[in-house]
Image (cartoon, grey):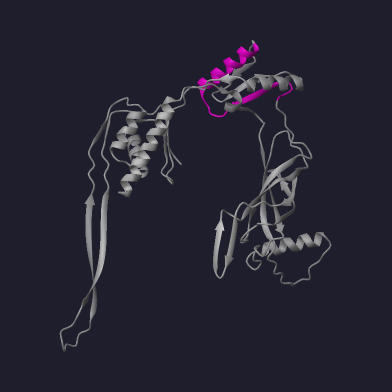
């Protein structure tokens, strides 16, 4: 009964999603949501630091010697030398990795949000303070400095050998916890004013529509397609005029059209998402489940009265094999998405069954879509 309810709920949800997908009218989108300018991107920053002020929930220094080493190095830089051979048993310190995203056009003094994550075996970073941590880019240069009090969303408590926790406590966040110290040089256009616009998804039809929309907006040929993703723009040489030019380009409305037929399957969760362009060739599908049940019981073998034998325990196993009925289902040629879903639902397929069926249809050449398993 539970399996049947699960199948019914899943098929109802899948049918509802398909209906919403097919009934949604095609709408134009702003160009800024479909593309980005070459070179205008975030840059990842990372650093290693220490969090102090923990309430006995820090690293166990015997198992994380790098925490003790980092603490000794920090203290020596602050003028305090730890005697050699000292066994530092500190439970209020934790080694962490600090990450942040440096937005384009960032200036010195700008504040960034940082994420702090435990490296060792600290139980919780709640109530801790991150000490000054340099954040470096891929080139090894320091671009920001992070420091501040952590906000940890999780909570926990333990007593008498029992513990309870809510959410994750080995990571936290500091809003505005880093200050930009170095700017990233960015050159959007060359000396001749030529720059590139890159589509998020490569598509020749969308590239053509974008070029027509841009040239129609400015009344001249300022855009030309290089390939299905890159569009070359002839921008003004003046910085102020270039900003106005790019603002007008970003605000244009473009209809990206219908994307390619695609089926995305998440093998870990069983989620299956189909685009509205999915169709089928003629095919017949039969899918059944083979159920093997093995049960074991133990019997005692008693010796005859006044015999010299010993009582022996003998196991016995019962094996039962059942195969569910799987009628052959026919799928007509050029069936649309609704027909595909209805046909699969008729089989009573669960999410895992759908993955197997879709793979078989793709291998047989009947599924007119790209099958992607993530």
Residue 310 painted magenta = no
**Is residue 244 visible to us here?**
yes
Magenta region, residue range: 189-218
Q: Residue 105, position in %: x, y?
A: 73, 33
Does the image show residue 142? no
Please say if 172 is above or below 280: below
Residue at x 74%, y 72% (from the top left corner): 86
- Number of numbered tags placed on the structure image: 0
Q: In this picture, is 304 found above or below 216?
A: below
Query: In the visual, does 174 lie left or right of 328?
Result: right
From the top left corner, tell me how far across and down residue 208 is, in percent.
54, 18
Q: Write down the quadrant of residue 187 in the picture.
A: top right
Q: Residue at x 53, y 29 (%)?
A: 201
Residue visible at 31% across and 37% down in the picture:
345
Measured as percent of width and height from the top left, residue 64 is found at 64, 64
95 shown above or below 106: below
When asked about the image quadrant of residue 261, the answer is top left
Image coords of residue 72 (percent x, y): 75, 63
In the depicted view, which residue is nearer to us: 162 or 330? 162
Q: Nearer the viewer, residue 211 or 155?
A: 155
Outermost residue toward the bottom in this view = 306
- Quick check: 260 left or right of 235? left
Is-magenta flag for residue 199?
Answer: yes
């Amino acid at each position: 009964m539970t399996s049947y309810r699960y199948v019914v709920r899943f098929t109802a949800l899948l049918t509802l999603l398909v209906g919403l997908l097919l009934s949604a009218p095609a709408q134009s989108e702003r160009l800024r949501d479909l593309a980005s300018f070459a070179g205008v991107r975030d840059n990842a920053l990372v650093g290693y630091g220490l969090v102090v002020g923990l309430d006995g929930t820090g690293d166990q220094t015997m198992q994380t010697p790098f925490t003790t080493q980092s603490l000794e190095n920090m203290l020596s830089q602050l003028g305090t030398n730890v005697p050699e051979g000292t066994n530092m048993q500190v439970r209020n310190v934790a080694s962490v990795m600090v990450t942040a995203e440096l937005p384009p056009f960032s200036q010195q003094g700008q504040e960034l949000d940082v994420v702090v994550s435990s490296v060792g075996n600290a139980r919780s970073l709640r109530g801790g303070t991150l000490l000054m941590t340099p954040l470096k880019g891929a080139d090894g240069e320091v671009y920001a400095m992070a420091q501040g009090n952590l906000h940890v969303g999780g909570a926990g408590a333990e007593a008498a050998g029992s513990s309870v926790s809510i959410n994750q406590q080995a990571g936290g966040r500091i809003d505005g916890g880093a200050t930009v110290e170095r700017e990233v040089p960015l050159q959007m256009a060359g000396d001749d004013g030529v720059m590139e616009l890159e589509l998020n998804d490569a598509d020749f039809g969308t590239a053509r529509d974008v070029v027509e929309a841009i040239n129609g907006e400015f009344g001249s040929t300022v855009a030309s397609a290089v390939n299905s993703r890159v569009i070359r723009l002839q921008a003004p040489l003046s910085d102020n005029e270039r900003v106005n030019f790019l603002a007008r380009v970003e605000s244009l409305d473009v209809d990206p059209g219908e994307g390619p037929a695609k089926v995305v399957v998440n093998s870990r969760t069983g989620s299956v998402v189909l685009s509205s362009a999915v169709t089928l060739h003629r095919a017949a599908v039969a899918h059944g489940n083979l159920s093997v049940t093995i049960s074991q019981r133990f019997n005692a073998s008693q010796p005859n009265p006044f015999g010299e034998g010993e009582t022996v325990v003998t196991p016995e196993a019962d094996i039962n094999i059942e195969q569910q009925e799987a009628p052959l289902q026919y799928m007509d040629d050029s069936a649309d998405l609704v027909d595909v879903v209805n046909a699969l639902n008729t089989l009573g397929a669960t999410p895992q069954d759908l993955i197997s069926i879709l793979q078989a249809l793709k291998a047989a050449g009947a599924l007119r879509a790209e099958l992607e398993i993530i």
